[in-house]
Amino acid sequence: MTNRWFLLFVLFPLFLVSQTIKGKVIDKVTREPVETASIYFDHTTIGTTTDENGEFSIEYNDAVQSNLVISFLGYEKVLITDYRSMSNVIVELVVATNTLDEVYVNFDDELTRAQKLQLFRKEFLGTSRVANSCKILNEEDLVLYYDSDNKTLYASSPVPVVVKNRLLQYEIDFDIIDFEANYNTIDFEEQRFLINAVKYLGTSFYKDLNVDSKKRVQRNRKKVYNGSVQHFIRALYNQNLKAENYRVYNKGKKVNEWNYISVKDSKQKGIKELTLKSKISILYKRSRQSTMELKTDKIYIDVYGNYAPIIGVYLTGYLGDQRVGDTLPSDFGLEK
């Protein structure tokens, strides 16, 4: 079973008006301002940097439901979840210690760096046509370690992994928190790599390179969106699975989806509660097959395609195989 895990999206009540957060980023010890620190909402295209005084201003709207990330090279990253109650904030950055990276830089672990990069690209970017158009621009920064005892590849980086997605025209800064790819079989001679489970956690910022709004790029993005996890969760929230071309099966038989899926309002405005009667199979447009199973009593979803908690949600098949190269920012299609 291949599991796809992402960093937890923190869900909050929705507001109908845009809001602005202003703040200042400083070194906790020296109290000096930090210039050009990155300020962004995780997994979106909304971001900015601090000025020479360490100050920033960033606006957000209802489409933003993820953490506010403050990041600067050499410092521990800061995640703010309760920013909706803030108008002005002082962020204190602490110098990072990358001891784990230092341990593994020159570790002899049976695989060459080229072999480890090959495995990492496949499980991080994916194998679809769109994923194959992606290129990691700073592979030299990756720290890769293969544990032969448990057949697991680990990856980290002192700086965000920069991915250029040519077909979707995004440049993605992905800051790895954790990456593990566990295999049943690795055989480079036979080119056999049988994956057991993949876990990757991190924060990401999407820079839109499609400044001229070319129709070809927009078509590519829409094609990737249709049938994606983001699309599926939004369809669950709106309870329009059939209209969005999803069909649900149980034990090989087509069923009424709402006999197996329950979606109801939660105590938080704009957030719905989802439960499953049992494991379900999902078919999108007669060709893309997936399964969904919950190992937790319920999860929470929103109209933007976010869900929480992540742990306990098992997606396999087409939905479970999507990787960074197949993803869109969470504010995709909601810019207006």
Image (tube, helix red, strand yellow):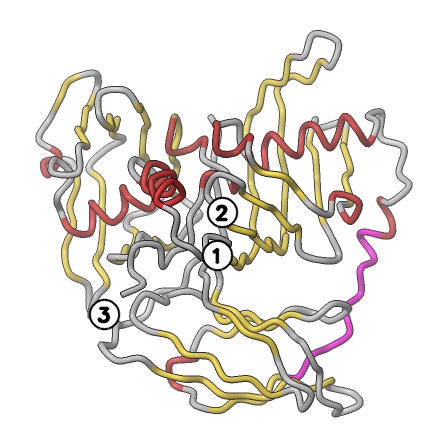
Residue 98 within the segment the image draws in magenta = yes
**Residue position for label 2:** 169
* Location of the C terminus (image quadrant): bottom left
Q: Dot 3: within a 10 Å radius of its alpha carbon, few (fewer than 14), some, or many (20 or more) residues?
A: few
Q: Nearer the viewer, residue 74 or 291?
A: 74
How far apart in space, not on screen, are marks 2 and 3 (Cα)?
A: 35 Å
* Image location (x, y in percent) of residue 204: 54, 57
Dot 2 or dot 3, earlier in sequence? 2
Dot 2 or dot 1, earlier in sequence? 2
Q: Are marks 2 and 1 in contact (CB under 8 Å)?
A: yes
Judged from the image, the secondary structure of the residue bearing numbered disc 1 is strand
Residue 199 within the segment the image draws in magenta = no
How far apart in space, not on screen, are marks 2 and 1 (Cα)?
A: 6 Å
Between disc 3 and disc 1, the foreground one is 1
Q: Dot 2: within a 10 Å radius of its alpha carbon, few (fewer than 14), some, or many (20 or more) residues?
A: many
- Say what amino acid the circle numbered 3 marks: Gln
Up the image or down, 66 lies above or below 8; here it is: below
* Image location (x, y in percent) of residue 157: 73, 52
**Residue position for label 1:** 208
- Say what amino acid the circle numbered 1 marks: Asp
Residue at point 56%, 41% (across, down)? 199
How far apart in space, not on screen, are marks 3 and 1 (Cα)?
A: 32 Å
* Image location (x, y in percent) of residue 128: 48, 28
* Image location (x, y in percent) of residue 302: 26, 58
